[in-house]
Image (tube, helix red, strand yellow):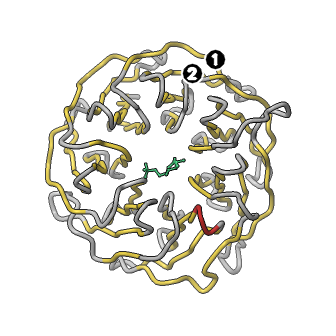
Amino acid sequence: MKQVVYVASPESQQIHAFRLADNGELSLLQTVEVPGQVQPMVVHPDGHRLYVGVRPEFGVLTYHVDSEGKLEEGAMAPLPGSPTHLGIDLQGRFVFSASYSFNNVSIHPLNEKGHALAPVQVLENIQAPHSANIDPTNHLLMIPALKEDRIRQFDFSVKGEATPHASAELKTVEGAGPRHMAFHPNHHFAYCVNELNSSVDVYQKDVASGEYRQVQALGIMPDDFSGTCWAADLHITPDGKYLYASDRTASLISILTVSADGSELELVGHHATQTQPRGFNIDHSGQFVITAGQKSDAIEVAKIDPANGQLTTLKTYPVGKGPMWVSILEIN
Ligand SMILES: O=C1O[C@H](COP(=O)(O)O)[C@@H](O)[C@H](O)[C@H]1O
């Protein structure tokens, strides 16, 4: 499997691209100087483009990916707010940008070259949207609004129009602060990590109605943790067996096992990782977790034990300053 790991470092305005070998070793392929502070990234489903959000001139920049995974700069499209998270629809026709500080989510069509264009729609008055996630049907846009303690839901049409879904929200407990989401590969469950109480909520999709409803809420911190909860990222392995969530105060990755049907999580351990792990990801083979330390200016590759999901650090690598986003591309 040929994979490339991209790490965004806003403070040094760089993306580091690494080849990921089958044994988990990384080798630096390219250091890209980005025209702006680069934060969120998302890979096109066809693997030929990488979209990145930049500041202080807010924009979404398209990079073309060559056959080795190297990036070549394309066009920049304007954003109506500081980019906190980028998502893409499953057919690869629209990019979503959530702006936490500007309380909006913009929808950007892609042209025939795959360049993101100016928004066709901006969803306003969403308080602190921390991500924009299309569910596996490609027809439901789920937006965790951190300061509303709810996930806002929108129907998403083939033309790229978002309209409030009949069941317009999924409530969390007060003060949870919903942030990032992951979907089970069986398409029946969604998971959301809550930043302010460091917990994960499980949502089951009803087969008949297609509606999600919460079936579990689980704290992810160690019993003796007494600091301020500050969870960040969430990812599930491709086989749906393990879910990982990071907390920045404790600099931990929490390890959760997922029941065979996806409905139930169990907290089975914690892995001490890089300082302030705001962003991490799982490789496409499901063997490695790669974590960026926002305060360590480094990334770490950890191996997943397939028997129990536990993590063992293999090696750390220096990157740019303030790394906070990790995207992984499988080259076909
Ligand atoms: O992780 C966080 O993100 C928000 C928004 O961040 P930004 O990257 O869009 O500036 C931040 O304000 C919040 O304090 C923090 O926990």
Query: Image point 74% across, 44% down: which residue?
Result: 258
- Position of 179 with respect to 22 (left or right) is right
Specify few, some or many for label 1: CA neighbours under 10 Å numbering under 14, 14-19, or 20 or more.
Answer: some
Residue wearing tag 2:
302
Asked if the residue under mark 1 is in contact with the one under mark 2, i.e. CB atoms within 8 Å, the reply is yes
Q: Quadrant of the N terminus?
A: top left
Where residue 215 sits: x, y (%)? Answer: 80, 62
Say which element carries label 2.
strand
Placement of the C terminus among the 4 image quadrants: top left
Residue that appears at 79% across and 55% down: 217
Between 259 and 29, the residue placed more toward the observer is 29
Is 118 above or below relative to 115?
A: below
Q: Position of residue 61 (x, y in %)?
A: 22, 51
Q: Is mark 1 within 8 Å of ligand 1?
A: no
Residue drawn at point x = 42 percent, y = 76 percent: 124
* Amino acid type, residue under disc 1 in the picture: Thr
Tell me which residue sits at (48%, 18%) in the image.
Answer: 24
Q: Circle 1 — which element?
A: strand
Whole-percent x and y of residue 184? 63, 53
